[in-house]
Every structure is written in structure tokens, then in C-alpha cells.
Image (cartoon, helix red, strand yellow):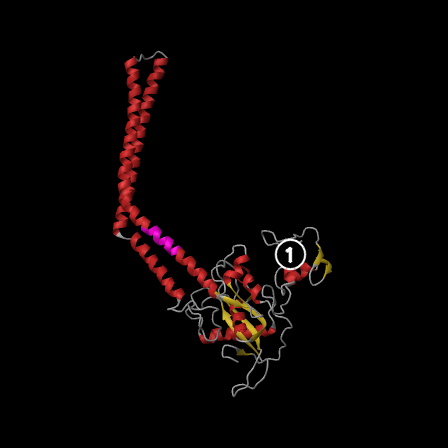
Amino acid sequence: MNKIVHHLNTDIQPPHQFTFPFCYEPHPLCRLAAAEVEHHIVESGVWQGETSCGKMFGVLVVREERRVKSEESDGSEGALGFIAAYSGLLAGRNDWAYFVPPVFDAQQPDGHFKVTERSISDINREIDCIRHSDEYKRVKAEEAALRQKAADRIAAMKQRIASAKAERDRRRSDAQTGLLQISEAEAAAMTRESQTLKADLRRLKQRLDMELSAAHALTFQYDERIAALRQRRRSMSDELQRWLFMQYRMLNARGEERNLIDIFSTTTHGIPPAGAGDCCAPKLLQYAYSHGLQPVCMAEFWWGESPRQEIRHHLSYYPACRSKCLPILTHMLQGLDVEPNPLMAAATERLKIVYEDDAICVVDKPAGMLSVPGKDNVESVESIMRQRWHQYDGNPIMV
């Protein structure tokens, strides 16, 4: 076998069906392969330099579909072996020889992804250069000080107007109770005072607005440049992410190929999440399909400390993630004889099949079960029947 495919010297019998990756008990062959990987991690030093608290590793037991006789081969057909993978990067690398390569290598220094990524980093540095420049800080500080000064002057003017109004109101109240006599001339003067103070406030605001506009014009040039750079960065990032997802052309057992944009187009969010395609299971299946290897069974285990956001135990086995891998593996497993989902199998038993042929199926839905999935993905007739017929093209149509 190829050096990435590792021998399994055992008489353990393989399973009759491939692992259902989202709910499984690791097959003894997978446990044997995982033990080999654990030994390699300890002895090879690949974990040195890994800064994350832990990482998911995966093993895929495979059988060669074809074996060509040579001096290095005994000519046997269908020898069992295994391939191994890790999620994402390991110690900043995706090219450790013992493990399968990524579905798409975005880490090449002269590749489109890294070149564009450096251009985006250049934009980030230009934004930081503007924001931290002495001139930008000076004009921003001057504008802020001027705005505060203007606000204080307006507040003082409004307080003066309020005090004058309170005095006028007092005099008018005293005049109504007979404590004070106000002549027509005094009444007219009081009205003029109110009008004058309001006019002074308007003129003050206009004058301050002009001063503020002049100060803002200086900062606006910088802010407009920063906004334009941020828009360019966002556009480049979105385009680069879409380009990257289109490079992940995922195979299935039938030899059919779909990129991640196409695979996730029918999901709730419609776009792949970050890191899609870099988990263990897609890497392993992609390598197997690309190199004429027949998948037999698969398992994933955690190595290292648990991350903060979820509980993971060192050397414990875990199902494939649903957020990233469910849409991908739904495609990649087509053409394989996969074990039924044990959870769905139990639910299916609750559905009485009234009639079924190659075209239609009539089921008796028990009370309380949803016909179609709800917002929380609670089991439904449709989800159960989709799993029942996962090996067929298309999805069942509810009538």
C-alpha cells in the first residue's frame, strides 16, 4: 500500500456496512487503527508546537480495490489498512507525512489564497496606520474637544434662556395676583427678551455648526478612506472565501463531485461555515475515493485537553460534527452501504408502513410526531424517511 495507507495485521473481521458517522460504536478495526495513530502522535513529536488545547483525529479503515503485482507487493487483493487525518491544521501544518493531505491545500505561500490573504493583511495594516497616526489622532481629538465646547456653550445658553423665562413667568404670576404692576412697555420688553434670546441661540448653533463642519472635514477625509478600505477588505474576504469553498470538490462513492457552495446551498444558512471540508471525515473519504480505496469503517477521537466551548475527553470517540459535516457527508456517503442511524431506526419503528413500493410509501403517523422538521430539527416523518432512503437520489416529497 501507499505509505499514507498503513497496514493492519489482524484477523478481525470487517463490518458488513460502513459506519454511520453521526452515531456509532467504534468497530474493533477502528480501535486498532486509532491505537496506531495514538502511538505515532506520542513517538513522532507531531504534537510539539501545537498551541490549541486539543484536536480531533480520525481513522478510516480501507480496502484496496485493486492491487498491482510488483517486487514490493505480494499481489494480494483487498488487503486491509487504514488512513489517518486530523481536523484543520496540526502545529500550523497540513502536510504531515503520516496523515492524508487536505482536500484543498490553501497553505501554499504562492497560491491564490495566501497571496490574496496577504493583500487583505496589507489593507489591515493600512487601516491601522491611519488610525494610529499622530495627525489622525490630533484632528480627531480637536474635533472631539470642539464638539464638547460647543455642547457646553449651547447648554449654557439654554440655561440662560430657561432662567430668563422663569423670571418672566414669576413677574407675570405676581402681576396676576396683584403683587406687581407690569406696564405695556415692560410687557413688550419681556416679549422682546424671549425673542432675542431664542434668536441668539439659533445664531450660536449656526456659528458652532460651521466651526464643527470645518473640523469634521479634516477627520472625514481619514474616516472616508478607512471606510473605503474596510469595504474593500470585506469584499475581498467574501470573494476569497467563496473561491476557497469552490475549490473543495467533494467526491462520493459513485465518483460524483460537488463543491461546498453547491452542497450547502440548500441548508438553512445557504453558505458553508468557516472550516467546512477540513474535518477528519471529509478528508479521509476524499483521499479514499481519490486513490481507489474502499471505505470499510471510520471513527474519530479527541487528543488533548478539552476546549472551553464544549466538553471533550482525551482519547474518547466522538461522532462527526453536524454543523459542518452533515451536509458534506450526506453527499460523500452516497454510493456506500451505510449502517442505519440507530436513533432513526428506533423512531422508524414508531412509523407504521401501510404500503411501500419503488415509487411511493404510505405511513401511519403517530399522534404528536411532526410531519416535517420544525425549527429545532425535531424528528419528523420527513426526516425519518429521508434517513430511511438516504441511498437514493433526491428527497422524499411529503404529500
Residue 234 x, y percent position in the rendering: 40, 55
**Residue 348 seen in render:** yes
Vertical placement of 115 versus 173: above or below?
Answer: below
List x then y, in percent, for residue 238: 43, 57
Q: Quadrant of residue 356?
A: bottom right
Circle 1: is it few (<14), some (14-19), or many (20+) Cα within 10 Å?
A: few
Q: Can you give x and y, in whole percent of width and height, for residue 123 in the image?
A: 34, 57
Residue shown at the point (42%, 59%) measured from the top left? 239
Residue at point 57%, 64% (across, down): 331
**On the image, numbered disc 1 is attached to which residue?**
397
Q: Is residue 227 magenta?
A: yes
Q: Residue furthest bottom?
A: 71
Q: Nearer the viewer, residue 270 or 178?
A: 270
Residue 135 image position (x, y, % from top left): 25, 50
Whether residue 392 sits left or right of residue 283 in the image: it is: right
Q: Is residue 104 above or below residue 234?
A: below
Residue 350 appears in the figure? no
Is residue 398 or residue 10 the one in the foreground? Answer: 398
Q: In front here: 308 or 203?
A: 203
Residue at the front extreme?
359
Q: Quadrant of residue 184?
A: top left
Q: Is residue 26 magenta?
A: no
Q: Nearer the viewer, residue 194 or 182?
A: 194
Q: Is residue 269 above or below residue 36?
A: above
- State the SS at label 1: loop
Amino acid type, mark 1 = Ile
Q: In this picture, which residue range is highlighted in magenta? A: 225-234
Q: Is residue 175 left or right of residue 68?
A: left
- Identify the main secondary structure in magenta: helix
Question: Residue 173 sits in which quadrant?
Answer: top left
Which residue corresponds to the image point at 33% horizontal and 23% vertical from the top-left? 165
Q: How many marks?
A: 1
